[in-house]
Amino acid sequence: MVVPSPLIEMPLFPLSSVLFPGGQLHLRIFEPRYLDLVRECTRYGTGFGVCLILDGQEAGEPATPAAVGTIARIRDFHRDENGLLGIVAEGGARFRVARSRVRSDGLVRGDAEVWPGEPELPVPVEFALLQSILERLIETMAPQWRHAPRSAYDDASWLGFRLAELLPLDVSEQQLMLELNDPVQRLAELRDILPRFQKP
Protein backbone atom coordinates (compact mmCIF):
# COMPACT_ATOMS: atom_id res chain seq x y z
CA MET A 1 0.00 0.00 0.00
CA VAL A 2 1.39 3.39 -1.03
CA VAL A 3 1.14 6.01 1.69
CA PRO A 4 0.63 9.48 0.16
CA SER A 5 3.13 12.17 1.11
CA PRO A 6 1.90 14.74 3.63
CA LEU A 7 0.81 17.99 2.03
CA ILE A 8 3.09 21.00 2.36
CA GLU A 9 1.91 24.58 2.00
CA MET A 10 3.79 26.87 -0.37
CA PRO A 11 3.38 30.05 -2.41
CA LEU A 12 2.75 29.43 -6.11
CA PHE A 13 4.16 31.42 -9.02
CA PRO A 14 2.11 30.75 -12.17
CA LEU A 15 4.19 31.29 -15.32
CA SER A 16 3.68 30.95 -19.06
CA SER A 17 6.61 28.50 -19.14
CA VAL A 18 7.46 25.14 -17.57
CA LEU A 19 10.31 24.64 -15.10
CA PHE A 20 11.88 21.17 -15.02
CA PRO A 21 13.83 19.55 -12.19
CA GLY A 22 17.42 20.75 -12.43
CA GLY A 23 16.46 23.60 -14.76
CA GLN A 24 17.27 27.28 -14.31
CA LEU A 25 14.69 30.03 -14.00
CA HIS A 26 15.46 33.75 -14.44
CA LEU A 27 12.74 36.12 -13.21
CA ARG A 28 12.30 39.88 -12.88
CA ILE A 29 10.19 40.62 -9.82
CA PHE A 30 8.15 43.80 -9.60
CA GLU A 31 4.68 42.96 -8.26
CA PRO A 32 4.35 43.41 -4.47
CA ARG A 33 2.91 39.89 -4.02
CA TYR A 34 5.98 38.32 -5.61
CA LEU A 35 8.39 40.59 -3.73
CA ASP A 36 6.70 39.24 -0.59
CA LEU A 37 7.15 35.70 -1.94
CA VAL A 38 10.89 36.28 -2.43
CA ARG A 39 11.21 37.76 1.08
CA GLU A 40 9.40 34.77 2.58
CA CYS A 41 11.51 32.20 0.73
CA THR A 42 14.74 34.01 1.63
CA ARG A 43 13.83 34.42 5.28
CA TYR A 44 12.83 30.78 5.83
CA GLY A 45 15.07 29.08 3.26
CA THR A 46 12.06 27.60 1.50
CA GLY A 47 11.11 27.25 -2.15
CA PHE A 48 8.09 28.32 -4.16
CA GLY A 49 6.01 26.36 -6.62
CA VAL A 50 6.26 27.16 -10.34
CA CYS A 51 3.19 26.08 -12.31
CA LEU A 52 2.23 26.59 -15.94
CA ILE A 53 -0.60 29.08 -16.41
CA LEU A 54 -3.70 27.36 -17.74
CA ASP A 55 -5.80 30.52 -17.82
CA GLY A 56 -4.84 34.16 -17.30
CA GLN A 57 -1.63 36.20 -17.41
CA GLU A 58 1.61 36.34 -15.42
CA ALA A 59 0.89 39.87 -14.18
CA GLY A 60 -2.33 41.36 -12.87
CA GLU A 61 -5.27 39.22 -11.82
CA PRO A 62 -4.41 35.82 -10.26
CA ALA A 63 -3.96 33.18 -12.97
CA THR A 64 -5.18 29.59 -12.91
CA PRO A 65 -2.14 27.30 -12.45
CA ALA A 66 -1.67 23.71 -13.59
CA ALA A 67 -1.88 21.16 -10.77
CA VAL A 68 1.59 19.70 -11.40
CA GLY A 69 4.61 21.98 -11.04
CA THR A 70 8.20 22.18 -9.83
CA ILE A 71 9.60 23.60 -6.61
CA ALA A 72 12.04 26.45 -7.32
CA ARG A 73 14.76 27.49 -4.89
CA ILE A 74 16.37 30.92 -5.18
CA ARG A 75 20.12 30.72 -5.88
CA ASP A 76 21.03 34.32 -6.72
CA PHE A 77 19.75 37.93 -6.72
CA HIS A 78 20.59 41.04 -8.67
CA ARG A 79 19.17 44.46 -9.58
CA ASP A 80 18.75 45.18 -13.28
CA GLU A 81 19.32 48.51 -15.02
CA ASN A 82 15.75 49.56 -14.20
CA GLY A 83 16.20 48.82 -10.50
CA LEU A 84 13.97 45.74 -10.65
CA LEU A 85 14.85 42.70 -8.59
CA GLY A 86 16.11 39.78 -10.64
CA ILE A 87 16.39 36.27 -9.25
CA VAL A 88 17.89 33.03 -10.48
CA ALA A 89 16.13 29.92 -9.20
CA GLU A 90 16.75 26.22 -9.70
CA GLY A 91 14.12 23.54 -10.24
CA GLY A 92 13.88 20.83 -7.62
CA ALA A 93 11.20 18.27 -6.86
CA ARG A 94 7.90 18.10 -8.71
CA PHE A 95 4.59 18.36 -6.88
CA ARG A 96 0.84 18.11 -7.37
CA VAL A 97 -1.42 20.76 -5.84
CA ALA A 98 -4.32 19.26 -3.90
CA ARG A 99 -6.00 22.59 -3.23
CA SER A 100 -5.17 26.24 -3.68
CA ARG A 101 -6.45 29.61 -2.57
CA VAL A 102 -5.84 33.25 -3.43
CA ARG A 103 -4.78 35.64 -0.67
CA SER A 104 -6.12 39.18 -0.48
CA ASP A 105 -2.90 40.47 -2.11
CA GLY A 106 -3.41 38.17 -5.11
CA LEU A 107 -0.72 35.64 -4.20
CA VAL A 108 -1.80 32.06 -4.87
CA ARG A 109 -0.90 29.51 -2.19
CA GLY A 110 -1.28 25.78 -2.50
CA ASP A 111 -1.25 22.63 -0.40
CA ALA A 112 0.84 20.22 -2.42
CA GLU A 113 2.03 16.63 -2.41
CA VAL A 114 5.75 16.57 -3.25
CA TRP A 115 6.75 13.77 -5.62
CA PRO A 116 9.85 11.67 -4.97
CA GLY A 117 12.74 12.07 -7.38
CA GLU A 118 12.88 9.76 -10.37
CA PRO A 119 15.18 6.73 -10.18
CA GLU A 120 18.48 6.98 -12.03
CA LEU A 121 17.97 4.74 -15.05
CA PRO A 122 20.51 4.19 -17.84
CA VAL A 123 19.51 5.47 -21.28
CA PRO A 124 18.47 2.49 -23.44
CA VAL A 125 20.62 2.05 -26.53
CA GLU A 126 17.72 2.84 -28.87
CA PHE A 127 17.71 6.42 -27.54
CA ALA A 128 21.42 7.11 -28.15
CA LEU A 129 20.50 9.61 -30.89
CA LEU A 130 18.80 11.76 -28.24
CA GLN A 131 22.11 12.05 -26.39
CA SER A 132 23.81 13.39 -29.53
CA ILE A 133 20.97 15.84 -30.17
CA LEU A 134 21.16 17.15 -26.62
CA GLU A 135 24.92 17.68 -26.93
CA ARG A 136 24.33 19.85 -30.01
CA LEU A 137 21.49 21.79 -28.37
CA ILE A 138 23.61 22.51 -25.30
CA GLU A 139 26.53 23.68 -27.42
CA THR A 140 24.39 26.31 -29.16
CA MET A 141 21.65 27.14 -26.64
CA ALA A 142 22.56 26.24 -23.07
CA PRO A 143 26.11 27.12 -22.01
CA GLN A 144 25.22 26.38 -18.39
CA TRP A 145 25.22 22.67 -19.23
CA ARG A 146 28.44 22.57 -21.26
CA HIS A 147 30.43 21.15 -18.37
CA ALA A 148 27.86 18.54 -17.37
CA PRO A 149 29.58 15.21 -16.70
CA ARG A 150 29.26 12.46 -19.29
CA SER A 151 27.36 10.41 -16.71
CA ALA A 152 24.52 12.96 -16.83
CA TYR A 153 23.85 12.12 -20.48
CA ASP A 154 23.54 8.46 -19.47
CA ASP A 155 20.77 9.26 -16.96
CA ALA A 156 17.37 8.88 -18.68
CA SER A 157 15.69 11.39 -16.35
CA TRP A 158 18.30 14.15 -16.80
CA LEU A 159 18.44 13.59 -20.57
CA GLY A 160 14.66 13.78 -20.91
CA PHE A 161 14.24 16.90 -18.79
CA ARG A 162 17.02 18.77 -20.60
CA LEU A 163 15.61 17.86 -24.02
CA ALA A 164 12.12 18.86 -22.95
CA GLU A 165 13.34 22.33 -21.95
CA LEU A 166 15.56 22.92 -25.00
CA LEU A 167 13.54 21.46 -27.88
CA PRO A 168 10.97 23.88 -29.39
CA LEU A 169 7.99 22.13 -27.81
CA ASP A 170 4.64 23.72 -27.21
CA VAL A 171 4.15 24.52 -23.50
CA SER A 172 1.35 21.95 -23.32
CA GLU A 173 3.82 19.31 -24.55
CA GLN A 174 6.39 20.48 -22.02
CA GLN A 175 3.75 20.15 -19.30
CA LEU A 176 3.05 16.59 -20.44
CA MET A 177 6.78 15.78 -20.22
CA LEU A 178 6.85 17.23 -16.70
CA GLU A 179 3.89 15.12 -15.60
CA LEU A 180 5.21 11.81 -16.95
CA ASN A 181 6.66 9.63 -14.22
CA ASP A 182 8.57 7.16 -16.37
CA PRO A 183 11.92 8.55 -17.63
CA VAL A 184 12.13 6.02 -20.48
CA GLN A 185 8.58 6.75 -21.62
CA ARG A 186 9.50 10.46 -21.67
CA LEU A 187 12.42 9.67 -23.99
CA ALA A 188 10.12 7.65 -26.25
CA GLU A 189 7.66 10.55 -26.47
CA LEU A 190 10.48 12.97 -27.31
CA ARG A 191 11.88 10.63 -29.96
CA ASP A 192 8.44 10.42 -31.60
CA ILE A 193 8.18 14.24 -31.66
CA LEU A 194 11.61 14.76 -33.26
CA PRO A 195 10.58 14.29 -36.93
CA ARG A 196 8.58 17.53 -36.63
CA PHE A 197 11.82 19.49 -36.24
CA GLN A 198 13.75 17.84 -39.08
CA LYS A 199 14.26 19.90 -42.21
CA PRO A 200 12.57 18.42 -45.32
Image (cartoon, rainbow, N blue to C red):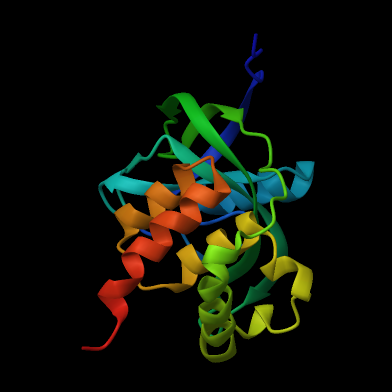
Q: Nearer the viewer, residue 72 or 96?
A: 96
Determine the residue positioned at 58% across, 83% down.
138
The answer to whether any part of residue 34 appears in the image is yes
Determine the residue positioned at 66% across, 18% down.
6
Q: Position of residue 158 (x, y in %)?
A: 64, 60
17 left or right, relative to 122:
left
Q: How many numbered discs sit on the rendered protein? A: 0
Where's the C terminus, which quadrant?
bottom left
The answer to whether any part of residue 27 appears in the image is no
Residue at the farthest left position: 200
In the image, residue 24 sits, relative to residue 200, either above or below, namely: above
Residue at the farthest front position: 125
Q: Nearer the viewer, residue 113 or 168?
A: 168
In the image, residue 2 sits, relative to residue 46, either above or below, namely: above
Q: Position of residue 55 (x, y in %)?
A: 25, 44
Q: State which quadrant residue 75 falls in.
A: bottom right
Q: Position of residue 119 (x, y in %)?
A: 70, 43
Q: Nearer the viewer, residue 31 or 170?
A: 170
Determine the residue positioned at 61% across, 54% down.
21
In the image, residue 10 sits, relative to residue 168, either above or below, namely: above
Determine the residue positioned at 69% across, 58% down.
74
In the image, residue 114 sits, relative to residue 190, either above or below, namely: above
